[in-house]
Each structure stands twice: as C-alpha cells, then as structure tokens.
Image: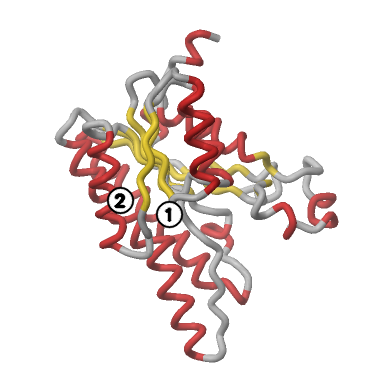
Amino acid sequence: MTEVLGELAGRRILVTGSSRGIGRATAALLNERGASVVVHARAASEHTESLLAELSARGSARVALVTGDLDGIAGASAVWDAAAAAFGGLDVLVNNAGAWIASALEPAEAWLTGWEANLGLNLLAPAELCRRAILHFADNGGGVIVNLASRSSHRGDDAEHLAYGAAKGGLLALTKGIARSYGRDGVLAYAIAPGWVGTELADGAIEQSVRDALPLGEVTPARDVAEVVAFLATGRARHTTGATIDITGADYVR
C-alpha cells in the first residue's frame, strides 16, 4: 500500500477542468498518490475552494490553483505558463477540460457557433497544451500526456452533437501522432475514451432506463477513470503509448 500511496511522488501534474467531475476525482487521486497537482478551472469558485481545502488538509503533496478560459489557443497557452510556473515545471499533462456542446444543423448560426465552440474547447485548446507539453518534456527528460476523449471519438455522436464527436475524434488522432512522433524524446501520450460517467453534472441527465441497460447496471464512477489516469501518469506502461483505453463498462466494445 505504501508503494501505491507514494508512486507519484515528485511528479508535477496539471489537470485541466478539475473543479468537478472526472477532473476533480483525478486531481484528488493523483494528490493522494503523492503528486504535486495544479488544479485548473475557468474561475475560482466554491468547488475549487473545497477541492483545495481537501487536498491541502492531507499535507502529503503540494497543490496550486490556476484559472483561465480554455476556449482556444491563446487561453491554453496562458494556462500552461501559469501551471508550469507553479512548481517550476510539469511532468504530466492531463487534458480533461471539455464540454458536450450542441451543434444543430439549423439555423446555420447555431451550426457554426457549435463547431467553433467545440473545436476551440475540445480540440484546439488541448492541442496547444500538448504542443507546450511536448516542447517542455523533450527538454526536460520526458513526460506523459493523457487526453480525455470520448466513446464518441470512435462511433460519432448524435445529430445535435456532430461537432463534439468530430473534435474528440481529432483528439484521438492527435494523441496517436504525438506518440509516434515524439516517443524518442521521452514523450508518452495516451487517450482515454469514457462512456457514461457518474458526476454531479451528469447524474441528473442519465435516465434510469439508460442505467438499467448498461452491462454492469451502473454508470462508470469517476474514480475508475481517475485510477487509469494515475497508472498512466507513473510512466510504467511506456509501450502502451499511443493507445486509447475505453472506459465504458462494456457498453461500447471495439
């Protein structure tokens, strides 16, 4: 147990979108395992305050808060600069921030707005953070990138969210390209593709009929996703770089 609790000691990790949901569970677990964690949110709130209080109370590892919009390249670059400065560098990037943004066919303005918002938050911002991470890791002995995609990356999404599926699909291609291109520089890149995940944001939107139809009879706990991120962050699975790990409770099997 001691080895598990301290297996991320010395690792400096940025988790974007970590005030709630999967990001919060991930930040908490990484800190529990000994990592110094940069918590990110669009703005300070009661959620960030409670998370910082929870992590600081442990006293086992450092924690810092960085705020800023991730709606495109400029915002992502500013977040990276602030996060890297918090602990004098980073060893792991967890691109978790994202949103299921509608992109209806009509009116045309809604289609265009939906595509721009999805590409900005779900692809361009993570891509810029990946770019900064690659440059930083290559100059500092390597590092790990974990990109949170979606099962929609594989199968596409519904008619109201075509842009979301396309953006998340692009994130998978980006992850594979990074792994293939920068492995010799010590950069490891992984993607995670969750299905239904139980969070305070999603619980009310997931109907009981959906839960009953799932192979395990329940939605995936956010902690399950966090456990996979924590393992990948150790760097122990080097030859898994480039892989996408599905976490759907067998609801979607490739």
Quarter-of-image position of residue 123: bottom left
Left of 241 or right of it: where is 186?
left
**Label 1 crowd (10 A; few <14 / some 14-19 / many >=20):** some
Tell me the kind of residue under disc 2: Val
Mark linked to residue 43: 1
Please name whichever residue, 74 or 248, is drawn nearer the observer in this view of the structure. 74
Tell me the kind of residue under disc 1: Ala
Q: What residue is drawn where x is 41% and y is 56%?
A: 171
Q: Position of residue 197 (x, y in %)?
A: 65, 47
Q: Position of residue 30 (x, y in %)?
A: 47, 29
Q: Secondary structure at mark 1?
A: loop
Left of 69 or right of it: where is 33?
right
Left of 110 or right of it: where is 142?
left
Residue identifier under label 2:
79
In the rendered image, is residue 176 in sight? yes
Quadrant in which the N terminus appears = top right
Q: Secondary structure at mark 2?
A: helix
Q: Are marks 2 and 1 in contact (CB under 8 Å)?
A: no
Rounded to the nearest angstrom, the CA distance separating label 2 from label 1 is: 12 Å
Q: What residue is drawn where x is 26% and y is 62%?
A: 74
